[in-house]
Image (cartoon, grey):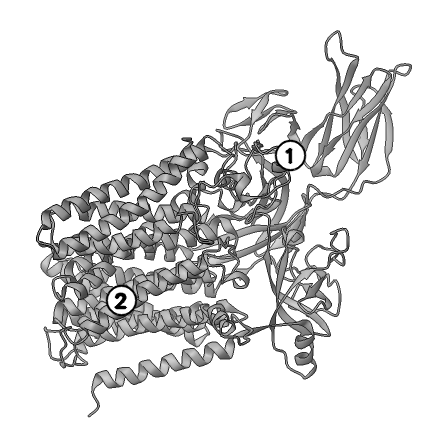
Amino acid sequence: MFTVGNIGHLLVISSFVFSLSFLIGYLISEKEQYKDDWIRFSKFSYLLHSLSIFGVIICLYIILITDNFLYYYAFQHTSILLPIYYKISSLWEGQEGSFLLWMFWNVIIGLYFSFKPISKWSVSIMVVIGFTQLLLSSMILGVVFYDVKIGSSPFILLKDAISAPIFQIDPNYIPEDGTGLNPLLQNYWMVIHPPTLFLGFAVSIIPFSYAISSLRLKDYKSWIIPAKKWLVLSIIILGIGIMMGAYWAYETLNFGGYWNWDPVENAVYVPWLFLVASLHSIILTQKNRQYYKMSLILCVLSFVLILYSTFLTRSGILGDSSVHSFTDLGLSGQLLIYLFTFIIISCYLFFIRWENIPYSEKEAKVYNADFWLYIGVFTLILMSFQVIFPTSIPVYNAIVEFFGGFSNLAPPIEKEIFYSSAQIWFASSLAVLSSIAQVLWWRGNETNEKFALFSKSLIITMILSAAIILLYPINKPSYMVLITASVFSIFSNGGVLYYFYNKRDLISSGSISHVGLAIMLIGILFSSGYSSIQSKNYTGLVWNSDFPDEVNNDNMLLFLNEERKIGRYEAKYLGTRKKVKNYGAYINSNYLEFIPIINKYIIKKDIEFDGNIFYENDTIEIDNNDITYFEISFDDGSSPITLFPKVQTDSNSDMIVFSPDVNNDFLEDFYVHVRTYPDPDQEVIWSNKDSVNVKIDEIFYLNDFVSSIQSINTKSNGINSNQFLVEANIRIQAEGQEYVARPAYIIDDNQVGFIPDIIDDLGIKVYLSEILPKEDKFKISFETTQKNWVIIEASKKPLINLMWIGFFIMIFGLSLSFNKIKLTNV
Amino acid sequence: MMKNSSAIAIVFISIVIIIIVSTFGDASTYVTFSKAKDVYESGSMSKFHVVGTLNKNGNNKIEGIKNSPDQLSFTFEMIDEDGYKESVFFGEPMPPDFLLSEQVVVIGGYENNTFIADDILLKCPSKYTEENIKI
């Protein structure tokens, strides 16, 4: 039977088979005399492999976009109401889909290599890509072989995946809705961050392939330039991917900052540093025809580290040590086998070729740029090692336990301090090394008095960094070193840049990247090192004197419309808001009356925004009913700001996700997020009922608020209905605005019922509890509860913009260098 | 004279050793409450990772949670892997998905005879393994 799932699964299997066939084809073509025939065969197989992968993705998209909940993957990752762009990104929420995404990029890159003019290099690179695709496609194979499960197919049926009791009653049961995309991931970054990251992974396979091919082909020289070009590209793409993740974490995920040294972050930071180390090693090799071994090893290790991080993040081994959660598909064994396959093959190639690799005894002189570049490469390696070694602690436990031992080692307690206090020294060294190396590299031949080249930038650095240190003031030794090193790097690299641009109209892309890095380091230093909590709890309420003083201090409880001091601001919580669709405006949720249509409300009073008037009883559509915004104003007397941190709930998963709002000033970000708010599902405790009998338009007091009944409306549901509804339209003047309560009185046959109306902002519940015809009055009752509140954390992140700006400068420099590398015939 | 490369190698290897030593020096351990208490009573202020679950009664209802009046902190009861029940104080508002968590890892130690958590890691089943279907 041909269902989309069967076709998809068939295509998965065919992609696996064709990857094997083009791998073998290319391998034979390297030896065979019928070379052209085998190449043709392999190209054709590769084309079929590519088409199979595209087909698999199309099949999976058909399932996801048509909400076909017969399939587990759709049930697990999407839901009917999800907008199309999140349905697209739901593909890579699951592990199977993210393997697919990785393979997709590999296929695209492979197409480039299989269709460019054939050379021994492109054939060998296709062999490596073929091997990778073979392993990756087996991860989603979903075949059981003598009780061993190979891969996990995304086309598995829901009833085969979960043994819910419903399937015993009705084997053909299909749920009406899926469980949707995790609200944490419902963000535009989810649409672009994973594809960028996986493209980075895919591109980094090429420098690796060149290194492996160099060993296989015993050609140690001609791979350098193309590998360098691909290295630069992978550094750019992976770097952008990482920073997208950092920005996502900062702006939405509320992990507290842009970088938290979480194992998942470390697992991609380390390979990136290794790629950078490889690039610098290759620059050395290219110039000196030396250090071939180092360049080969680094290029291979970079990719092995990417595989290692894939293993770390997908095997579930990080379970207890990461805030990220991962599904363990039971594929750890398979992942481990792949990792070791790559390691063993690489080691074997190095072993048999080691003696052949060109080697020179020549030593780099200290006053030569090469020496400093060489040290820089080792600094990058140490920098990575300092991160990956502790991140791997869960792996050591697993190894010890595998051999029957017992190990209860846990990651360091304060990981931010643990990592950053070491990384800061490496970063400072890099800033200094990059300065010295760049200046000597470009201008080292101009004079014998090398030190003179640095004198100007040294003097400026001394003056400027001393001024910053004294005036800011910076009082930690490591921070002083980093700021001095970064300023030095900006001026010496900047000097090189200026000198050459003036003299020879030449742009040193390396200098640009290094200036960018230094600016970035300054941004990181201030935004992290001097990030300060503004919402210190000064109320002096200590709940329990047994507890230490330092706790209970960083968050502030704000009651609605009550001012509290936060930093230099008077902060005031103004209530919950919904975002109006197509207008970008926020509307007080108390002005909205619920109707049972998704994302739609009736508005209770006339409202105007941006010149558009909405009238009472109009229907209004909001962006996403699961998202509630908290309007908080901050007034420092001169420039008041209003921020809208938000919360997103998810009825399917009970997940609650808070996202911050940031006031982005050039010099500092003011970062506010909600920690908690009254749980809408929790039962509210109401006071005893108070009542008052009033006429229409008569002024009365509802819990001290000036109120009046503006009108009484009646509704009946047609002639045949016995239901009759009386609704009072009560206007309440409170907190500087007019609220509308619309309690109703229902007559249904001989029964009487009430529909109260709740005004959250005022903590009030209003009933129309009696109609008094004799007196021409209405009895209005009300109950009260605690005023609405919210707990926030607010912090200042100084100069965070320098980090983003520096990063873009670095990427700009790398892109220039990418353009400059001219490929010859390889 | 010593060659540059040998000097670099020596410095490199020493930094590697420093990193390894400091990693194991700063690494925490997974322990049970009783072990953490022993260490505290012997006068050390060391901090640990403790793995456990929330205290649930027979009806799967969570017991022993006390929110501070200002909602800015809370205490809860946690059962460690030995089945020992202990009160844990956390000086921050309750994380929204706290009550749904299947497994809790608290990072902290005893102070004034109370276990104070500096950080809490939650493993919530909700989103990551759909094991049943809500109809």
Q: Earlier in the sequence, mark 2 or mark 1?
A: 1
Q: Are marks 2 and 1 on the same chain?
A: yes
Q: Quadrant of the C terminus of chain A?
A: bottom left
Task: Kindly indicate the quadrant of the structure image that contains residue A447.
Answer: bottom left
Location of residue A175 with respect to A414 vertically, above or below: above
Location of residue A804 with respect to B26 vertically, above or below: above
How many C-alpha atoms fall within 10 Å of the one at disc 2: few (<14), some, or many (≥20)? some
Location of residue A818 with respect to A399 vertically, above or below: above
Q: Which residue is mark 2?
A: A346
Q: Looking at the image, which residue is at 30% across and 68% down?
A: A344
Q: Chain of mark 1?
A: A
Percent x, y for residue A626?
58, 37
Q: Amino acid at mark 2?
A: Ser
Q: Looking at the image, which residue is at 50% across and 25% down?
A: A611
Q: Which residue is mark 1?
A: A169
Left-right relation of A473 to A619: left
Label 2 residue SS = helix
The front one of A367 and B28 is: B28
Location of residue A493 with respect to A166 vertically, above or below: below
Q: Looking at the image, which residue is at 55% across and 45% down?
A: A645
Task: Kindly indicate the quadrant of the structure image that contains residue A284.
Answer: bottom left
Q: Amino acid at mark 1?
A: Ile
Q: Chain of mark 2?
A: A
Q: Quadrant of the N terminus of chain A?
A: top left
Residue A472 in view, yes or no? yes
